[in-house]
Image: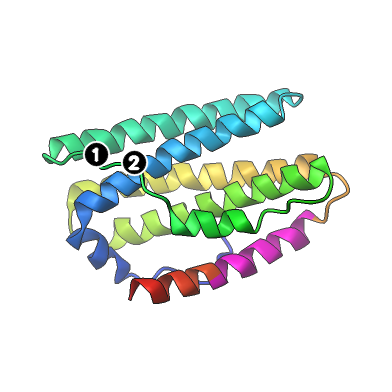
Amino acid sequence: MLRLKLPTDPRWAQLVESNIEEILSDHAWAEQKAASNALSVVTNNSEHPDLVSDMLAIAKEEVEHFQLVHNIIVARGFTLARERKDPYVNELFKFLRKDGSRTMAFVDRMLFSALIEARSCERFKVLSENIKDVELATFYRDLMESEANHYTTFLSYAKKYGTGVKVDARWQEWLDFEKKVIQSYGALAE
């Protein structure tokens, strides 16, 4: 369903478990950024009532996820670390088209968002199936379903309002680019 071109190695779950406090903070901030992204989509595309409603719902859900992750952080005696830049998202952001029509910019923003949600969904699945911490495995399983819904929502709107843009072709370009980012990101982590 996600069509990602490079799956996350299940051994990644071991890295997560060995660094859970940092991972939870990064996850919390990723949820906050996802909420901000959905609100930004509303700000720039308020002429589509259906899009506005769905983006507001996503923003609300992402803030709720931020709260849930923060609750886990506090319950485990950790502290929410300061927000850090996300190299993965920053690399993807560079691929956004800076030229072209407003419609092209909209499509690219939707595809950028869909790709981040797809990778989150895929990683949450890996965690839910491979992490030893039962509470977190269940938590990530629940979030995986939510991220899948967000992914399909962004992709659907790219197609719905992407009149005149070859959305499927551009989606393939995004998938190819993301594969390269993941390959280089994995090399940096080793």
State left or right for residue 47 relative to residue 143: right
Residue contact between numbered discs 1 and 2, judged by CB atoms under 8 Å: yes
Is 55 covered by the magenta stretch? Answer: no
Looking at the image, which residue is at 35% across and 61% down?
Answer: 126
Query: Which mark is drawn over residue 67?
Result: none
| Residue for badge 1 | 80
In percent of width and height, residue 111 lies at 65, 51
Q: Can residue 5 be seen here? A: no
The magenta segment is 167-180
- Tag 1: amino acid: Leu
* Quadrant holding the N terminus: bottom right
> Chief secondary structure of the magenta span?
helix
Is 176 covered by the magenta stretch? Answer: yes
Decide: is 151 above or below 75: below
State left or right for residue 69 relative to residue 57: left
Looking at the image, which residue is at 51% across and 33% down?
Answer: 36
State left or right for residue 175 relative to residue 184: right
* Mark 1 or mark 2, whichever is nearer to me: 1
In percent of width and height, residue 150 lies at 54, 42
| Residue for badge 2 | 28
Give how far apart the Cα atoms at labels 1 and 2 are: 8 Å
Please tell me which residue lies in front, 92 or 52. 92
